[in-house]
Amino acid sequence: MDKIENYAPNEDLLRDRVILVTGAGQGLGRAAALTYANHGATIILHGRKVKKLEAVYDEIEALGKTQAVIYPLDFEKADDKDFVILAQAIAEQLGRLDGILHNAALLTSLSPLEYQSVAQFRSLLQVNLIAPFAITKACLPLLKASADASVIMTSSSHGLNPAAYWGGFAVASAGVQALMKIQAAEWEILPNLRMNSIVPGIVNSPQRIITHPGEIKQTMRRPEDLMATYLYLMGPDSKNIRGQTVFC
């Protein structure tokens, strides 16, 4: 872990790479998109709200490096064809894909299972688990064509150690861990392709505000403080890291 926390990447670490960042409009997704762009990557900015994506787009433009692409899509309402269209758009507009950061997440207020509805569970599983599976599947031909492709799942400590009141979110997070392990094992024969997961931990993010509204934000780590880990797992220096859960 010390190796990652002290990681000092080259400025052009991600040059000529195309990376899809889901949930890029705020929090960790925004920080990762800006960080990846600052290290040379062309970023596909995914999110639900175009206005937020446009703000991140403008921040990337201000870096004076590669131009980003905006792709809005509501995962909660998406089905197979929407994910296929996303992959087709990437292929037609950019011609390649070298990485995916699955960061988009849905988190509702915490409550006992007896008060959680089927509709809530369905939405939590759809956004947090099914969408990453479907995107990775749809984009697999592009990823296989890359010389060095990295897919990063975002998980939660509650997926590893489920706790009361976390309900469908914890179930989806546990599913993310299982999905990552299965996919990484199936990709063992593909030396150019890898998948790992990140557990961000306590960080000042929009999700954290929902679950812990009373915390003092100034005492918490910022999304930018975690970016060494995000860079390491996305770039070529982690090419031998596969099927691992990395804690920030």
Image (spheres, rainbow, N blue to C red):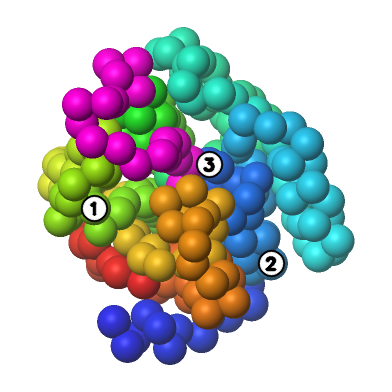
- Separation (CA) of disc 1 from disc 2: 32 Å
Q: Amino acid at mark 1?
A: His
- Residue 17 falls inside the magenta stretch: no
State the residue at coordinates (57%, 29%). 91
State the residue at coordinates (36%, 72%). 248
Q: Residues within 10 Å of mark 2 (few under 14, many from 20)?
A: many
Give how far across and how far down residue 79 sits, in percent: 43, 13
Question: At numbered mark 2, what does the secondary structure look like: helix, strand or loop?
Answer: helix
Contact flag, marks 3 and 1 (Cβ < 8 Å): no
Q: Nearer the viewer, residue 128 or 33?
A: 128
Q: Main secondary structure of the magenta part?
A: loop
Is label 3 or label 1 in front? 1
Question: Disc 1 or 2, which lies upstream in sequence?
Answer: 2
Question: At numbered mark 3, what does the secondary structure look like: helix, strand or loop?
Answer: loop
Q: Amino acid at mark 2?
A: Asn
Question: Disc 2 or 3, which lies upstream in sequence?
Answer: 3
Q: Which residue is tagged 2? A: 38
Is label 1 or label 2 in front? 1
Q: Nearer the viewer, residue 180 or 216?
A: 216
Contact flag, marks 1 and 2 (Cβ < 8 Å): no
Q: Amino acid at mark 3?
A: Thr
Please state the extent of the stretch shown in magenta in the rendering. Answer: 103-121
Q: Which residue is tagged 1? A: 158
Q: Which mark is residue 22?
A: 3
State the residue at coordinates (48%, 48%). 210
